[in-house]
Amino acid sequence: MSPAAPTAPTAPTALSAPTAPADTAPSWKGPLRGRAGLVAVGVGVIVLHVWLAMAVWFQGPSPVTGSADATAGDQATVVFAELPRIRVTPPVSPAQQPVPAEASRSATASPAVPAPVPMTSPAPAPVPVPVAEAPMEAAAESPAPPAAEPPVPSGTPPRYRTQMPSPTRLVYRLQRGGFAGRAVLDWQFGSEPGAGYVLQLGSAGSGVIGDRWAWHSAGGFDGNGLAPLRHTDRRGGRERRAVNFQRAAGVVSWSASSRIEPLPPGLQDRVSWIVQLAAILNAEPGRREPGQRIEIWVAGLRGEVQDWRFEVLGAVDLPLPGGATARALHVVHEPLRPWAPRVELWLDPGREHLPMKMQFGGRLPLEPLELLRDDANAAGGEPPVPGS
């Protein structure tokens, strides 16, 4: 068999537009359907998640109780209903967070953090209750001065001329509120010339508040008048407190205090000032005029020295027991400090300006103490010497 003869090349023909096969044209409907399905599935998933989130957030009650009679179709719902619920709690501030035991123990043991102080109203101050005590002491004796108060006034007391009254013994009616009694002022010179003086003022008889009391002063005289050496406060015949005027050493000391202070010239005690005031008025008639002032420094019983300033108010008629009246010189001492006593005197010019009446302002709630001279009863039966 002979090989086929080669075919001759065909002549080129005119170009024409290619024709696409009928089945190969592109179609957009298939991909669109796929995308729509995916979108629907995504939306469904989102809706399902939103619904689940809302169910968990609001913690709504389960529609199925999950009983043993639940059907197979309901079991899926039961599984959903028993999903663990998430409880949302508000944030806790640092002050409310619990403290561990170790931290609590260390905070308690540390002194750097003080415990909070409760804000409470201050308790009312207790009301002072009056105690039965010697009436003269309660009325005339001032309490101890405040810590900031100097124990001795500044400067020096004035100096006056003096003329001592004659020795005498005066009896008084003692009155405070509903209590009454008798008191004696006993002023005597020493038994020998130059032996000085002895002065006592105290209760006599019964009917007085508290124990029998007496103020005793003993001393001599100098250029300023009376010069006390020792002053004692007695109760029931026994000494309780004393003031010592150590003139050789130039100091004054107290049994009720550790203070030792320089001895001012003319310093008096709590009873000698009565005679010192009378001696000044006897020696200086011009001091008896209304408006005149006399200053006497007085040593208390608790370590203090006070400047007592007496003002002359003038002559007045004073009623006496039995209906009689007498002319008296009215003198008053107004305290310079709230804790000092107020003293009011009616002095008898006929008895060398010794007191006809004395009134001592009592500290609240105590009433003032009053001593009124009782000459009529003194002659009938004199009471015993105070403190004996």
Image (cartoon, grey):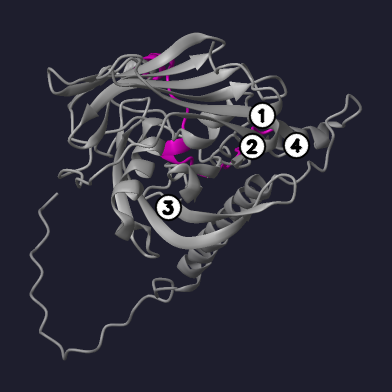
Question: What type is the residue that disc 1 sits on?
Answer: Ala
374 above or below 302? below
Q: Which residue is mark 1?
A: 379
Identify the secondary structure beneath mark 3.
loop
Q: Which residue is mark 3?
A: 334
Q: Residue furthest right?
A: 69
What's the mark number on residue 375? Answer: 2
Return the disc, 2 or 3, that comes first in the chain's sequence: 3
Mark 2 and mark 1 in contact (Cβ < 8 Å)?
A: yes
x then y, percent, for residue 20: 34, 78
Q: Cα distance, mark 1 to mark 4?
A: 26 Å
Q: Residues within 10 Å of mark 3 (few under 14, many from 20)?
A: some
Q: Residue at x 68, y 19 (%)?
A: 205
Q: Residue at x 87, y 32 (%)?
A: 71
Identify the secondary structure beneath mark 4.
loop
Region rendered in magenta? 82-106
- In the picture, measured across the screen, residue 233 lies left or right of residue 109, that is right
Return the disc, 1 or 3, that comes first in the chain's sequence: 3
Return the disc, 4 or 2, that comes first in the chain's sequence: 4
Is any part of residue 253 visible from this angle? yes
Question: What type is the residue that disc 4 sits on?
Answer: Gly
Residue nearer the viewer, 256 or 246: 246
Q: Cα distance, mark 4 to mark 3?
A: 26 Å
Identify the secondary structure beneath mark 1.
helix
Identify the secondary structure beneath mark 2.
helix
Q: Cα distance, mark 1 to mark 3?
A: 35 Å
How would you classify the magenta stretch by its main secondary structure?
loop
